[in-house]
Amino acid sequence: MKHRAIKRRNVVIGIGATAGVAAVGGIALNAGAATANASGSGDNSLVFDPDAYTELTTTVTDTEGTERAVTYHFWKAITYVSKPVDATYQSLNVSVPVEIDGTAVDASNAPILLANSVGGYMPSSVADATGVGGASMGGGAPSGAPTASASASAPGANGNTNATGGAMNTNQLLALAAGYVVVEPGARGRGLKNSDGEYYGSAPAVIVDLKAAVRYVRSNKGRIPGNVDRIVSAGTSAGGAVSTLLGASGDSPIYDKHLKEIGAADASDAIFAVGAWCPITDLEHADGAYEWNWGTNALSTGKQVEQTVSKDLRSQFAEYQAKLRLRGLKGSGFGTLTARNYDEYLLKQYMEPAATTYLAALPDSDRETYLAKNTFITWDGEKAAFTWAGFLTHVGARKKTVPAFDAFDLSAGENNEFGSATTANRHFTAYGAKNDTTGLSTKRIESDIPELLNLMNPMYHLVEKVNGKRSRHWWIRLGTNDTDTSHVISANLAARAENLGDEVDHLYYWDEGHGANTDPGDFITWIAEVTGYKKAKKK
């Protein structure tokens, strides 16, 4: 293929290497690029045009502090369905490395990182992206939509999360520098309204769109670079929830009618592996899990939430947890996980190891200072130990009121996510509907809600209808100070996946909040390990 001279666009992206912690910041220099000589395909075509790219360069500083000069081909805003409701959101970008540090590479069989930018179940778009990592939330909260309860303004998120909860571009940049193909899909989200005043982004739009994006990629095997059988999803907060849902629900027939409506490609939507950071999922049980975790913690105002409601929800969680009959991870020493032993399980399996890792990495003087300020921790020189009560006191104020997700006044982002075409916000739990304070004529959830919950919950595909086409590799991360969700949610997900025989890598980041991603380099290495990919091949 002939190209005219290309004036490259250099972008320096700094990813800090200190203790493997990433901090993202971009500086654009010498903007300008030439598009490859190609015939573009129509917006509604489901055939990928391998020649319709722009060649760009970027410099990525990896977590070891090494600068990588990456030249890559960039395909922008490809509509991935034949009957889009809104192509602004139902389109994807593709980035394929062709040269790293001056050496040509062949990424034709590389893993594909499918990185969503979903936050708070809001719409996300790639339409304005000018290169890899440029996906964004679709213009912020639509008019009249409640604030996302998955918002990520908590301290300790270490710069990796946008204001609405969608992940920053750390994973995409590191993946590109490692020789992987990066696909960034947009998706419809809550609050979107058409000219007739109808909402078109509520559940299950986000997962249907992401599945359609996977089908587009898979249907273009041999045309789109990368190994379509080694797709690894990544997302944060609500994006982490839909990332796990993608992994759990591969090829489930319950989505077929929705995929047909938008003209999704006739291909599999199963993915190989899942990366999920602070996934807020299992929403119909999330209120109970939240109160079990944070029910005794006061709000930032110092005021306690209504304890009668909190206790009701804690009881509901205990009943639900007992029905799950989950076992602790291998080597944990725990059998069935219940509301009575979950605090001890979280301490031994996650919290104390997280504190131990953190403290062991500190210089002696810094460790002494930290321990002097946090006397609830016992340190024997090798391991940290503390009580659950001490841990809760250390974390401090809870982020959300009660109920955290199905608010009695319909004010939570999740109420908006489960809205209908004509109703902005609806209850999705029997308890929320029964205690509605908005004056609804009925105190019951609407008839379509149970099906929507199944469509939106990965646990449905892992517990109630165990899916044989699910992902078998799970990377799950959460900050110990994250009060946007309950620690039980991701721990249940990890336990169930491992109980089914899947490979699970799940840990917590000590003293980090919502959206933290302090080991991105390890995630990129993990992708290579689970997919069996060694490195980008030289041409």
Image (spheres, grey):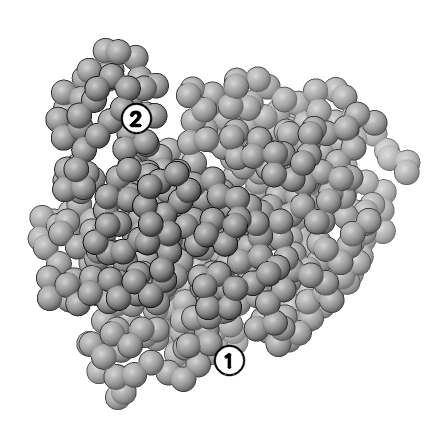
Residue at (33, 80) in percent of width and height: 445
Circles 1 and 2, Cβ within 8 Å, touching? The answer is no
> Which element is circle 2 on?
helix
Residue drawn at point x = 47 percent, y = 49 percent: 498
Q: Secondary structure at mark 1?
A: loop
Residue highlighted by disc 2: 356
In 3D space, how far apart are the residues under numbered discs 1 and 2 (Cα atoms)?
Answer: 56 Å
| Mark closest to the chain's N terminus, 1 or 2 | 1
Q: Which residue is found at the position 28% from the left and 44% from the top?
A: 345
Question: Which residue is tagged 1?
Answer: 196
Q: Position of residue 318 (x, y in %)?
A: 24, 62
Classify residue 54 by image quadrant: top right
Side (left or right) of 330 relative to 96: left
281 lies left or right of 128: left
Residue extending furthest toward the bottom: 441
Q: Nearer the viewer, residue 244 or 132?
A: 244
Q: Residues within 10 Å of mark 1 (few under 14, many from 20)?
A: few
Please name the residue shown 45% across and 63% down the image.
463
- Kind of residue indicated by mark 1: Asp
The picture places residue 509, in percent across and down from the top left corner, at 35, 34
**Which amino acid, by three-letter code, is at mark 2?**
Thr
